[in-house]
Image: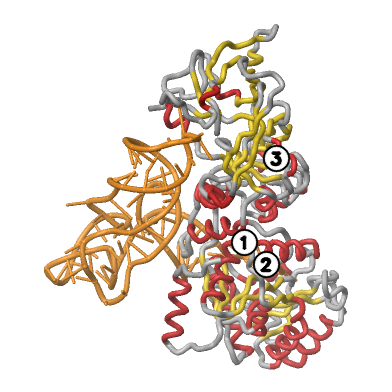
RNA sequence: UGGGGUGUAGCCAAGUUGGUAAGGCACAGGACUUUGACUCCUGCAUUCGCUGGUUCGAGUCCAGCCAUCCCAGCCA
């Protein structure tokens, strides 16, 4: 992975270094284990990981698991697996919940310092006391409770004496602040719920705004890089860091999150897709999750390349999914082995080719890369070609097979149209052609040229497989455009998956192992599915030059 | 309507102390081609949300305005 790129965060760090900062840069990726990582997560991972590496620093994975009602071990395992797959291997793995003891101690310190108090207001009352965007809040009647009473109450909260929601611990800041996050935010709440790691040890849990800066400070994080919706929380982050007075104070910097056209990025909706059965699971290749992209055949490097090219800034942006497609094509064009797959077969009989004879044609595995070598593919009297490569009434500039036309079979002979054969229903059933034995090398000794080259698979040895053509998972241009009262289902494109049965593949594909990627010549990039033998997922189609040329 | 962000081409995005608009994607021409792919050339903002101001000179400084995003969870 290359860490040579630069952005405003690096500029900031460079400035800090010239101003005298000499410590080790330390970043972290802090997902809440409440869902699977997606392409948007990859941006946060990339920024935190590459920044640490660029400066020779450290990168932590920290599960931000302070809310036991939403979190689960299933997600913990998946997150780590995805991170490792991406290659952003963390230097340390921590759990926010492992700091619950310290959080508690710091909360007690805050109480002793008169900076926090136990509040008996209900959730509804607290909301009312908070005021609105334009009106200041008013102080809680419990705000001036004595320190001893607060200490006693907080300990009894911890001891399980009170039911959920009965009391909270609040930071004593400023109920009239124009930043609502500073209007005496709750920092601890009562929750009699067992935690995925802590079990029933706790019945009070710290809230994000209190726990996060503590976690960062305890781990020695220097740069807490997060997405921009936390910008309003930074004053509170700093407040906590300063009140506790950590020796080394971490600093938060925000960047814009990644949005991609046609792509759902909300965990809430992704979970809905899984739970409603609209997709097969978190790794359904139509999903924008990392495990789905992996199953579909995307590479980690293409995903990071995409994130890099999309850039890092604070501007709201909606990046074209075409950029991701470009990144994976660009990489696979250099690395993927070329193979032949006929998606909609049409049988061709070479009437002048000896019956029972088979010869072997040598094809390059990758014309872009000689070191990829060659392979032998069988050739005989009956072949499959792409149905779309024959046109009885060809449009202008049609280069493929047409009545009385001649084309080259990829890597070998020229063949000439002789006649079309129809079945009893009038459907085209096969083509009879003749081949020119002099053109085995794909060139004619008499110098005659052929405009089209089409791909083919020999009938006898062809492997039958299923090709799955995934399209983008559609919503409107942006899910944010969806009105509140609209049904989410209406925004999904039901045609987002096309399954092609009975595709004919060249023989060596019989042994394709799960996860192997190929370029099916003139068709697209495909990946052997990790769950179903004989199924290939289309990662991305090749660019279509036909329509472009035809329209000229 | 309070506060905090952000506004440079269709989509992203560089633009250090003011000196005369990088790059990528997309798109459009052309060359090449035993994948109509790839590759290779070429083109693509007299203009930086708008309006004024300062200046010999402003995307960069100043003022005002407009647009848009975030915040009223005991979620993260």
Give the chain of mark 3: A
Asked if labels 2 and 1 touch by Cβ distance under 8 angstroms, the answer is yes
Residue visible at 82% across and 69% down in the picture: A196
Q: Viewer-proximal residue, B35 or A133?
A: B35
Residue drawn at x 72%, y 35% is: A466
The secondary element bearing badge 3 is classed as: helix
Tag on residue A41? 1
Q: Looking at the image, which is closer to me, A289 or A534?
A: A534
Q: Which residue is mark 3?
A: A508
Which residue is at 69% across, 79% downward?
A: A170
Local crowd size for mark 1, using a 10 Å CA cut-off: few (<14), some (14–19), many (≥20): some
Q: Position of residue A455 (x, y in %)?
A: 58, 30
Q: Is A183 placed left or right of A101 in the picture?
A: left
User: Is residue A164 or residue A309 the one in the foreground?
Assistant: A309
Give the Cα distance between marks 1 and 3. Answer: 37 Å
Instruction: Determine if residue A483 is in view.
Output: no
Mark 2 is surrounded, within 10 Å at the Cα level, by few (under 14), some (14 to 19) or many (20 or more) other residues, namely many
Closer to the N terminus: mark 2 or mark 3?
A: 2
SS for dot 2: loop
Work out how far the residue at label 1 is from the one at label 2, CA to CA, in angstroms: 8 Å
Q: Calculate the distance from the C-alpha at mark 2 to the C-alpha at mark 3.
A: 42 Å
Residue B16 in the image: state x and y as whole percent.
31, 74
Q: Chain of mark 1?
A: A
Task: Point out the frontmost of discs 2 and 3.
Answer: 3
Q: Earlier in the sequence, mark 1 or mark 2?
A: 2
Rendered position, A408 above or below A510: above
Q: Chain of mark 2?
A: A
Residue corresponding to mark 2: A31
Please tell me which of labels 1 and 3 falls first in the chain.
1
Give neighbour class at mark 3: few <14, some 14-19, many 20+ (Cα, 10 Å).
Answer: some
Residue A526 relative to residue A167: left or right: left
Q: Hey, which quadrant is residue A199 in on the image?
A: bottom right
């Amino acid at each position: 992975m290359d860490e040579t790129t630069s952005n405003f965060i690096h500029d900031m760090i460079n400035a800090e270094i010239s101003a005298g900062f000499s410590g080790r840069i330390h970043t972290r990726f802090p997902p809440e284990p409440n869902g699977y990582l997606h392409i948007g997560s990859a941006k946060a991972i990339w920024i935190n990981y590459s920044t640490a590496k660029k400066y020779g620093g450290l990168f932590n994975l920290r599960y931000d698991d302070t809310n036991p009602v939403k979190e689960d071990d299933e997600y913990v395992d998946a997150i780590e697996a995805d991170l490792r797959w991406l290659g952003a291997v963390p230097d340390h793995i921590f759990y926010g919940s492992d700091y619950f003891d310290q959080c508690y101690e710091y909360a007690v310190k805050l109480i002793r310092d008169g900076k926090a108090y136990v509040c008996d207001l209900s959730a509804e009352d607290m909301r009312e006391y908070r005021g609105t965007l334009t009106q200041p809040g008013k102080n809680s009647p419990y705000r001036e409770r004595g320190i001893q009473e607060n200490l006693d109450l907080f300990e009894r909260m911890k001891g399980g004496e009170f039911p959920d929601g009965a009391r909270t611990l609040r930071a004593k800041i400023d109920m009239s602040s124009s930043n609502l996050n500073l209007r005496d935010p709750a920092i601890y709440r009562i929750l009699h719920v067992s935690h995925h790691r802590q079990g029933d040890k706790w019945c009070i849990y710290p809230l994000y705004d209190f726990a996060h800066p503590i976690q960062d400070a305890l781990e020695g994080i220097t740069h807490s890089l997060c997405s921009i919706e936390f910008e309003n929380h930074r004053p509170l982050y700093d407040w906590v860091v300063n009140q506790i007075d950590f020796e080394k104070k971490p600093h938060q910097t925000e960047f814009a999150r990644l949005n991609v056209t046609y792509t759902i990025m909300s965990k809430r909706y992704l979970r809905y897709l899984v739970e409603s059965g609209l997709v097969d699971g978190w790794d359904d290749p139509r999903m924008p999750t990392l495990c789905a992209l992996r199953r579909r055949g995307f590479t980690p490097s293409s995903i990071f390349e995409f994130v890099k090219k999309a850039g890092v800034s604070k501007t709201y942006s909606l990046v074209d999914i075409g950029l991701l497609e470009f990144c994976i094509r660009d990489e696979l064009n250099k690395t993927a082995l070329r193979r032949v797959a006929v998606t909609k077969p049409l049988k061709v009989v070479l009437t002048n080719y000896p019956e029972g004879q088979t010869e072997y044609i040598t094809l390059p595995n990758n014309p872009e890369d000689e070191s990829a070598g060659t392979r032998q593919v069988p050739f005989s009297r009956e072949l499959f070609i792409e149905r779309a490569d024959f046109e009885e009434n060809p449009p202008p500039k049609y280069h493929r097979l047409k009545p009385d036309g001649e084309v080259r079979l990829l890597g070998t002979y020229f063949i000439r149209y002789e006649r079309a054969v129809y079945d009893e229903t009038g459907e085209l059933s096969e083509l009879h052609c003749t081949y020119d034995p002099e053109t085995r090398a794909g060139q004619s000794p008499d110098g005659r040229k052929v405009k089209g080259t089409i791909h083919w698979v020999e009938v006898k040895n062809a492997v039958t497989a299923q090709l799955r053509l995934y399209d983008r998972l559609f919503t409107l241009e942006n899910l944010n455009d969806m009105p509140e009262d609209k049904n989410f289902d209406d925004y999904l494109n039901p045609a987002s998956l096309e399954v092609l049965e009975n595709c004919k593949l060249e023989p060596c594909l019989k042994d394709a192992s799960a996860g192997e990627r190929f370029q099916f010549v003139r068709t697209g990039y495909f990946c052997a599915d990790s769950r179903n033998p004989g199924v290939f997922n289309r990662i991305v189609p090749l660019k279509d030059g036909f329509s472009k040329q035809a329209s000229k």
